[in-house]
Amino acid sequence: MFWILLVAIVGATIAVACVVWRKWIVPWRELEQLVRQIGRGEQPNTFLIGGGDEPRRIGLALENILSRQRQLDRDAAKRASQQSAIFSAMQDGVLVLDGERRITLFNNAIQKLFGLNEQSLGAPLLEMVREATIDKLVSETFKKHETTRGEITLAERSWQVSAQPMHHGNGAKSGAVVLFHDITALRRADEMRRDFVANVSHELRTPLSILRGYIETMLDDPKMPRGETARILEVMDQHSKRLGLLANDLLTLAQLESGSSNLQLSEIDLLRFLSDLVRDWRKKFLAKKLEAVVDISDDCSIIYADEERLREVYDNLLDNAVKYSNKNGLICLRANRHGSEIALSVSDNGIGISTEDLPRIFERFYRADKARGRQLGGTGLGLSIVKHIAQQRGGRVEAESKPGKGTTIRVILPVVTQT
């Protein structure tokens, strides 16, 4: 009887141990294995755990946690990618500093501007960016806890620099963001505006001063000899015409720049157009014994353009060609097609333009030979008008010249087909 009872007790103990092992020991080991796999970033084969209800619920909870964590990681990676793309695409330079004024982040613009690299992260600002102005701005930002601004010149460009402090939620400073905005174009535009006003004032002052002087002379001497009066009136007439030309050119330039002048495209027989143009200029050609030649390729004998603007382009180019040609010279009007573009050019074999002056001849009021240009009666706006007409048509201008050998001005326009 005793042995039977002992066997029953041992069997019951073993059965209880097996139940405990299966329901409590084994599941917790499986849970430990799941946690370790998740900690290593691995994807478990299954989250189904045997045993009691509690281990099974914990396994399902771990699966939900891992799923949410993966989604959060994907969202974070997506936001980081978007931020990186935006950061890299910014034209302005962005430099982020921590509370110790160490570099924590920068974009491509800053990398190119200062030659920074991955090793620059964590380095002190002054060690990587050796610019006293920037260091001073950042120092004032950290000291005053407010945005500071300044301007510097780097790599032959002008930059507006602003340093914005960053703060933690509790108000403590956490660093600063330094922005670099390229204002070179604005400075150049402002300089061009000032130069334009100064040039207009100068161009107007000269003829007005002459007119006023002669008017005062005639008022002071009413009995001036007739011959002298005729000479003075002739000079006054020349300068009044010069003022009229200047006013007309300024108005034309203003219309072109504002875009208020619309193009009226029409079919133009270029050979007929240029032949009529040469005929109209014949008197001025004969005055300097110049020969004019028209050379047009067959594939651009008919073009679509605004005839009035095209005439204005050629009148300005021929005016310069005649002025700066020597007697018995040659002027050639050419038209050639290159792919989807037509090149219209006027060439002369006159005095030419120096290499230093050539890049600037399309600027307003710019004259390679200022004294001679005014003596010949030009306003200094002709080539600028040509450039703006070409740009309005979607084209561009080019210039080639050699001193003493002549000049070629080329207007390149896109081919337009009749609609």
Image: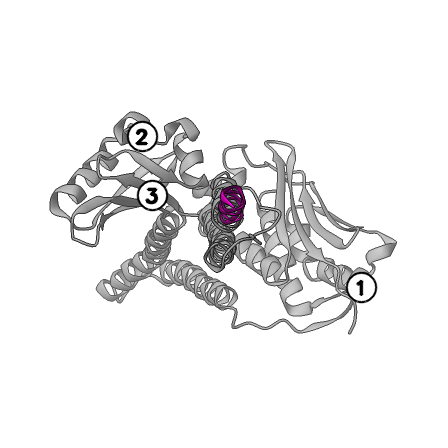
Camera sees residue 378 = no
Looking at the magenta stretch, what is its main secondary structure? helix
Report the magenta residues as a range: 1-16
Marks 1/2: CA distance? 64 Å
Question: Viewer-proximal residue, 19 or 149?
Answer: 19
Query: Crowding at label 2, few (<14), some or many (≥20) Cα neighbours within 10 Å?
Result: some
Circle 2 SS class: loop
Residue beneath disc 1? 272
Per the image, label 3 sits on a secondary structure element best described as: strand
Q: How many marks?
A: 3
Residue beneath label 2, please?
129
Q: Position of residue 150 (x, y in %)?
A: 24, 44
Pointer 3: what residue?
159
The picture places residue 232, in percent across and down from the top left corner, at 37, 59
Mark 2 → mark 3, Cα distance in angstroms: 15 Å
Residue at (27%, 43%) from the top-left corner? 151
Q: Residue furthest right?
A: 298
